[in-house]
């Protein structure tokens, strides 16, 4: 990769100490297509976010991918927020068009496009586990694509609020046996993430062959939930596919060209294997 004074800069930002796979994935794509782009990564304190956004304009940074915990806070500092990001209530993508910053959300596309490879979504019954930011993007995407959604969350009030916003059903996690009637199960919580890889709040016997199981957790690559689903013969969708598909959309928005999906997937999987 040759970096010159005309190279366009994209980057991601996350909280202090957070690691990100996005630079590996995006830079592999730039390299493959010979694009004069580079993708960097930075950690910030939340109180420095406003100054960071000014810096994006000053340095003419073309695109910023936003990870936890800035997805909501950054909305206060942008010139424009597209309607989908407004409805989801979070921005994970900022595009700089000649100094004008617009916030978008591609997380929901990460969910629906990774599911598309294994199932039709329209008409299916989906259970979303969790009611945080990731769950919100999933609920938006699933409903937009015609699924009937039930939300299950440990804290029922949060499930209720999310369900009211999107007009769907909600249950406490203790009612999780209802999952038997569901087609697509999505873990949108951090349960099962390294280092607590043995945590599983869905009893093993609930998963059956007819299910499609997506786990937003991508570290470890095959979580305990997905291992169990695999054992039962269910179709599974790795968290890395969600990550890839939200990144593919960002790539297109930043560069204006279609992302090389296979190259980016390979780079991501190789990096995850090395984790
Ligand atoms: P994000 O924005 O990544 O979705 P979040 O807003 O912190 O993160 O949401 C995390 C989700 O994981 C929540 O739904 C949380 O449940 P609560 O609303 O009850 O807190 C869920 N979660 C985290 N740890 C959990 C655990 N050990 N058991 C069950 N649910 C858990």
Image: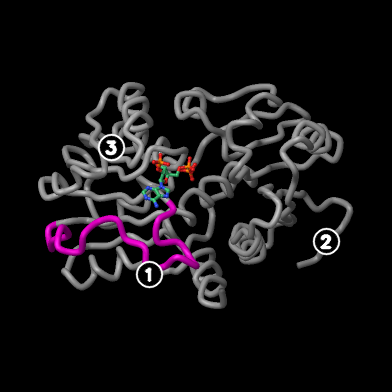
Mark toward the viewer: 2 or 3: 3
Q: Which mark is residue 12?
A: none
Q: Quadrant of residue 271?
A: bottom right
The answer to which of 27 and 126 lies nearer the viewer is 126
Quote the CA–CA distance across marks 2 and 3: 46 Å
Depth check, mark 3 against mark 1: the one in front is 3
Is residue 12 something that shows in the picture?
Answer: yes
Q: How is the image coloured?
A: one colour
Give above or below for 32 relative to 130: below
- Outermost residue, right side: 5
Instruction: Point out the tag, 1 or 2, that comes first from the N-terminus.
Output: 2
66 with respect to 196 (left or right): right
Dot 3, crowdedness within 10 Å: few (<14), some or many (≥20)? many
For the N terminus, the quadrant is bottom right
Residue indicated by mark 2: 3
The stretch of residues the image draws in magenta is 190-210
Kindly indicate whether the residue at mark 3 contacts the one at mark 2 (C-beta within 8 angstroms): no
Answer whether residue 202 is magenta in the image.
Answer: yes
Helix, strand or loop status at disc 1: loop
| Mark 1 and mark 2 residues within 8 Å of each other at the beta carbon | no
The residue at 82%/32% (across/down) is 54
Number of marks drawn: 3
Report which quarter residue 193 is drawn in.
bottom left
Q: Main secondary structure of the magenta part?
A: loop
**Residue drawn at 26 percent across, 57 percent down:** 213
Instruction: Mark 1 vs mark 2: give the one in front.
Output: 1
Q: Which residue is mark 3?
A: 151
Figure check: 227 above or below 238 = below
Q: Which residue is labeled 1 in the image? A: 222
Q: Position of residue 211 (x, y in %)?
A: 17, 56
């Amino acid at each position: 990769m040759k970096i010159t004074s005309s190279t366009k800069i994209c980057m991601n930002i996350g909280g202090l100490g957070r690691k990100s796979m996005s630079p590996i994935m995006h830079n592999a794509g730039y390299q493959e297509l010979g694009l004069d782009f580079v993708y960097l990564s930075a950690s910030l304190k939340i109180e420095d976010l406003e100054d960071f956004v000014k810096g994006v304009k000053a340095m003419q940074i073309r695109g910023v991918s936003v990870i936890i915990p800035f997805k909501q806070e950054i909305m206060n500092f942008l010139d424009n927020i597209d309607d989908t990001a407004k409805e989801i209530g979070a921005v994970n993508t900022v595009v700089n068009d000649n100094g004008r910053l617009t916030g978008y959300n591609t997380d929901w596309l990460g969910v629906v496009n990774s599911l598309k490879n294994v199932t039709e979504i329209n008409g299916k019954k989906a259970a979303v586990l969790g009611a945080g930011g990731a769950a919100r993007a999933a609920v938006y995407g699933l409903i937009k694509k015609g699924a009937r959604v039930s939300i299950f969350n440990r804290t029922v009030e949060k499930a209720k609020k999310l369900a009211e916003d999107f007009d769907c059903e909600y249950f406490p996690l203790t009612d999780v046996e209802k999952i038997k009637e569901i087609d697509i199960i999505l873990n949108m919580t951090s349960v099962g993430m390294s280092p607590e890889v043995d945590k599983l709040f869905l009893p093993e016997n609930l998963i059956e062959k007819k299910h499609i199981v997506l786990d937003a957790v991508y570290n470890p690559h095959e979580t305990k939930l997905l291992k169990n689903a695999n054992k039962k013969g269910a179709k599974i969708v790795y968290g890395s596919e969600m990550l890839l598909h939200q990144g593919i959309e960002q790539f297109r928005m930043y560069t204006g060209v279609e992302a090389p999906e296979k190259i980016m997937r390979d780079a991501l999987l190789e990096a995850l294997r090395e984790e």
